[in-house]
């Protein structure tokens, strides 16, 4: 526990991976006075990707980091008119789009817009692109990283935010490939003006036999992000840039609600990726190395929480690290894992279950509809969670137990 009377050495953190988890962790760490450098393999940040949703549980953290205005400028408000439909367009029920206080802090965001907003809030010297990490070692005092470009770096803590196919994971647990869900996702963006009359602020999900289709706005509402989830036996490596066949996509949803068919007629280019996740890992930490985001708890996208949970991770870790001595890192990262797993283990499992609902893998569809219509309480519990408060309460509890 932090003892303010004693002098401490300032912590130096190295983050491997400049995705949403890595950059938001860097923002959170710098806000708490921890020196941080992010090493990203790509030459440019965030050139790939489409839409993702930022929900109240992550937005309240990003706003505290001072990103409120930047996100309001590029996000698309989502709330009114959000609904679940059956494949024929009949309504299953409304989608819960606010926390228990009634706050509708939800944006549809282009991944690149979110990454740019995070990067712009950090000093440019914090982010080192063109740094693919290829090696890691540590001793009791320090951790060292090796990069493909021949450079090396040292830090008191290494935060591995290098995604679902993490190269750093093998320094923590026995390596295993991610698990293929049997589903391929086609996704893309359509200028809103191509679909006059499309609802302004709605997230819409159509659920059908083995498939589902989702639409929501991004980039200040100027673009509509769509994703069509269809079964596919071919387990392909996860990729965000493989070009999909738009005819194949359209024929997968032929005969569905005319709104879906109309939208798919406007598609010019689409991309696809295979959906993978992992079962909870045995451990997230070893000594001075800690996993964060998809590297720690890759999950299916059916609750839209992948990016949101990565953001929560960074906040929890930075609260626990603030004002602490480098010698304490191995103990702190274990506390971080304990604190976070209580939440992410459940969300990983619930994302899988929600996928079964959305793909109608139910003998009794009335039961599916009831579960979806009653999902509001669970969604509110996701949105209400305030990870900063939870981490601070954990510190206070640890302090009390030492007093
Ligand atoms: C290119 C890309 C596009 C995506 N697009 C979408 C999308 O459209 N919709 C959606 O919902 N989710 C998308 N995701 C996933 C979503 O961003 C993540 O689930 C979530 O944000 C968790 O973030 P993360 O930071 O843990 O992982 P990621 O966002 O996957 O970021 C990991 C980062 O680590 C970097 N990296 C990997 N290996 C190394 C290495 N050895 N050395 C240095 N850097 C390394 C990667 O280049 C990447 O920038 C995308 C992910 C990626 C990588």
Image (cartoon, rainbow, N blue to C red):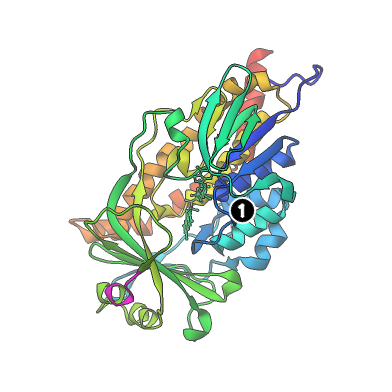
Q: Along the line of sight, which residue is nearer the eye, 95 or 100?
A: 95
Point 33% across, 80% down: residue: 261
| Res 376 → quadrant | bottom left
Residue 103 in sight here: no
Query: Which image quarter holds the C terminus?
Result: top right
* Extent of the magenta region: 244-248
Q: Is residue 275 magenta?
A: no
The secondary structure making up most of the magenta span is helix
Q: Is residue 175 above or below residue 39?
A: above
Point 56% across, 50% down: residue: 20
Q: Is residue 220 above or below residue 335?
A: below
Percent position (x, y) of residue 271?
Answer: 39, 67
Identity of the residue furthest to the front in this view: 150
Percent position (x, y) of residue 103?
Answer: 61, 57
Element assignment for label 1: helix
Q: Along the line of sight, which residue is nearer the eye, 39 or 76?
A: 39
Q: Which residue is mark 1?
A: 59
- Marks counted in the figure total 1
Q: Is residue 200 above or below residue 181?
A: below
| Res 317 → quadrant | top right
Disc 1 residue lies near ligand 1 with CB under 8 A: no
Point 64% across, 67% down: residue: 74
Residue 362 in sight here: yes
Point 29% across, 49% down: residue: 180
Percent position (x, y) of residue 65?
Answer: 70, 48
Q: Is residue 58 above or below residue 319?
A: below
């Amino acid at each position: 526990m932090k003892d303010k009377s004693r002098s401490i050495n300032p912590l130096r953190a190295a983050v491997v991976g400049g995705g949403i988890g890595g950059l938001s962790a860097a923002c959170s760490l710098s806000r708490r006075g921890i020196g941080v450098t992010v090493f990203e393999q790509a030459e440019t940040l965030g050139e790939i990707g489409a839409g993702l949703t930022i929900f109240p549980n992550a937005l309240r953290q990003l706003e505290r980091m001072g990103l409120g205005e930047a996100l309001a400028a590029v996000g698309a408000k989502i709330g009114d008119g959000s609904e679940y439909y059956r494949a024929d367009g009949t309504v299953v029920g409304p989608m819960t789009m606010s926390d228990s206080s009634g706050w509708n802090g939800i944006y549809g965001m282009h991944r690149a817009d979110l990454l740019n907003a995070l990067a712009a809030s950090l000093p440019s010297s914090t982010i080192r692109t063109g740094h693919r990490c290829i090696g890691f070692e540590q001793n009791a005092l320090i951790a060292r990283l090796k990069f493909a470009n021949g450079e090396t770096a040292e830090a008191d803590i290494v935060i591995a935010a290098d995604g679902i196919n993490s190269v750093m994971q093998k320094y923590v647990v026995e390596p295993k490939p991610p698990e293929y869900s049997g589903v391929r996702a086609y996704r893309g963006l359509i200028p809103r003006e191509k679909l006059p009359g499309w609802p302004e602020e709605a997230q819409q999900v159509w659920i059908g036999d083995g498939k589902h289709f989702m639409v929501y706005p991004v980039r200040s509402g100027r673009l509509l992000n769509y994703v069509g989830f269809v079964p596919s036996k071919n387990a392909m490596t996860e990729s965000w840039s493989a070009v999909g066949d738009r005819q194949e996509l359209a024929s997968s949803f032929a005969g569905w609600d005319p709104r879906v068919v109309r939208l798919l007629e406007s598609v010019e280019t689409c991309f696809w990726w295979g959906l993978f996740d992992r079962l909870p890992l045995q451990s997230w930490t070893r000594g001075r190395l800690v996993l964060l985001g998809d590297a720690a708890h890759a999950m299916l996208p059916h609750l839209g929480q992948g990016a949101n949970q990565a953001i929560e991770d960074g906040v929890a870790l930075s609260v626990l690290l603030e004002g602490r001595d480098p010698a304490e890192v191995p103990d702190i990262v274990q506390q971080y894992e304990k604190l976070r797993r209580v939440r992410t283990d459940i969300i990983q499992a619930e994302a899988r279950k929600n996928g079964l609902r959305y793909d109608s893998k139910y003998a009794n569809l009335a039961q599916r509809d009831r579960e979806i219509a009653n999902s509001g309480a669970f969604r509110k519990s996701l949105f209400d969670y305030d990870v900063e408060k939870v981490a601070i309460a954990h510190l206070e509890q640890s302090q009390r137990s030492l007093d």
